[in-house]
Amino acid sequence: MKSHREVLKLNIPSRMEFVNITPQVAEAVRKSGIHEGLVLVNAMHITASVFINDDEPGLHQDYKNWLEKLAPFDPSPQRYAHNRTGEDNGDAHHKRQIMGREVVVAITEGRLDFGPWEQIFYGEFDGRREKRIMIKIIGE
Amino acid sequence: MKSHREVLKLNIPSRMEFVNITPQVAEAVRKSGIHEGLVLVNAMHITASVFINDDEPGLHQDYKNWLEKLAPFDPSPQRYAHNRTGEDNGDAHHKRQIMGREVVVAITEGRLDFGPWEQIFYGEFDGRREKRIMIKIIGE
Amino acid sequence: MKSHREVLKLNIPSRMEFVNITPQVAEAVRKSGIHEGLVLVNAMHITASVFINDDEPGLHQDYKNWLEKLAPFDPSPQRYAHNRTGEDNGDAHHKRQIMGREVVVAITEGRLDFGPWEQIFYGEFDGRREKRIMIKIIGE
C-alpha cells in the first residue's frame, strides 16, 4: 500500500465563497503515483467545507442565499450562544454542517473517477484568514 | 492491497425517489473477494445522493416532504439562479446537499459491517434519465 | 495492508446530546499500529451521527436549538408518518441527516491528522438506550 499527503492553503478575501480545487486534487493524485485507491479531501477548519457539486455561478449564489436563510450571519450572542466566546462565526459552524466536512473520491487507473459534472469545492464560511485543506491518498 | 470497481445504473421514473441498493453493494463486496477494507458508494451525479438510513416507507415520505420544504421544486429562475441556465433542477442540487453524496462502509470478514437497521439508499432528486452510482472497494 | 476494528458503546441518558469521542478514536489508532491510512468512524444506528466540529458548549446548544427548529421532536404521526410504526423518533432520523452518519480522517505518522480545532463527536438524537459506534482503520 502507498500513501500520499498534501495540504492546500487558501486565504479567501470574503466571509463566504466557493473555490474549485479539483485541479489541485487531480495533481496530488498524479504525484502520488497511486493507480487504484481512495482520496480523502477535508477542510481542516470547522467553519469550512469540502463538497462536490456543479461549477455553475448561479448555483453557488443560490447556495449562499439558502445557507444564509438556514443559518444567518449574526455576530450577537443572542442568536448564537457560540458568539459569547468572542467569536462572531456561530453561523459558519452551522453552514459547514449542511455542506459537509469532507469528500472521499475513487481513484481508478491513476485518475479521479468522477461522473460528468462532479467538481470538488472548498466552501469558506468564515474567511479572511489562512485555512488549510487535507488531501490524503491511499492505494496502490 | 486489492481493489474492485462497479458502476450501477438506475433510471428512476419520477423526479424524487429513494431506492434501496444494499443488495447490489453487498454483491459487489462478495465479488471483490475483499475481507477487510472499506467500500465507497457515491452518486456520480450532482442532483442525487447516496445515504444510509431506515427502509421504512413512512420515513421516506417524511424525507420527501421535509426536503420539499427546505428546497422547494421551482423551475423559475426567480427562486434559483441556477435555472437561468435552462435547467429546472436548482432544488435538486440543494436536496442532495442535505442528504449527502456518499457513504463509506466498513468491510469485515468479507461483509458489510453494519448496525441493525443500516441500509444504503440511492436518493434521486431529478430523475427520468439514466444515472450512475460508483462502488469502489479497497482492502485485502 | 493492515486493518483494525473497534466498536464503542454509549448509553446517553437524554434524548439529544453530543459526546467527544476523539480520545477513544485516537487510542484505537494507536492500538492499530497503523502509521499511514484512513480511519472511518460511523454511527451504527440511524438516529445518531458522527461529526467533526468544535468542543464548545455554546455551539452545542446552538446546534440543538437549530436542529429542533429544522426537525422538531413530535411523537405524533401527523407530523412524521414514520411515527405510525409506533416509534416516536421521526425527528431523530431527520436531525441525523443534517449532522451526517460518518467521518473519515487521515492517519499520518501514527496519529489523527487534524486541523487545530477538529474534534470527533457522537451525536445522539434518540438516546436512553445502548448505541454503537464503528471504528474501522486501514493502512500500513
Image (cartoon, coloured by chain):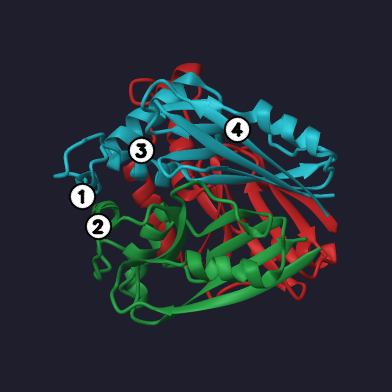
Chain colours: A green, B cyan, C red
Q: Residue at x 37, y 67 (%)?
A: A82
Q: Nearer the viewer, mark 3 or mark 4?
A: 4
Q: Which residue is mark 1?
A: B81
Distance between the alpha carbons at the discs numbered 4 and 2: 32 Å
Q: Which residue is mark 3?
A: C72
Residue in front for this viewpoint, A122 or B117? A122
Mark-to-mark CA distance, 1 and 4: 31 Å
Answer above or below: position of A66 versus A8.
above
Would you name the residue on which mark 4 appears? Answer: B8
Asked whether disc 1 touches disc 2, contact meaning CB atoms under 8 Å apart, the reply is yes
Q: Residues within 10 Å of mark 1 (few under 14, many from 20)?
A: many
Say the numbered circle drawn on residue A61: 2
> Where residue C33 sits in the image (x, y, percent)?
85, 67
Badges 3 and 4: C-beta atoms under 8 Å apart? no
Q: In the picture shown, does residue A115 fall above or below A91?
A: above
In the image, are marks 2 and 3 on the same chain?
no
Labels 1, 4: front one: 4
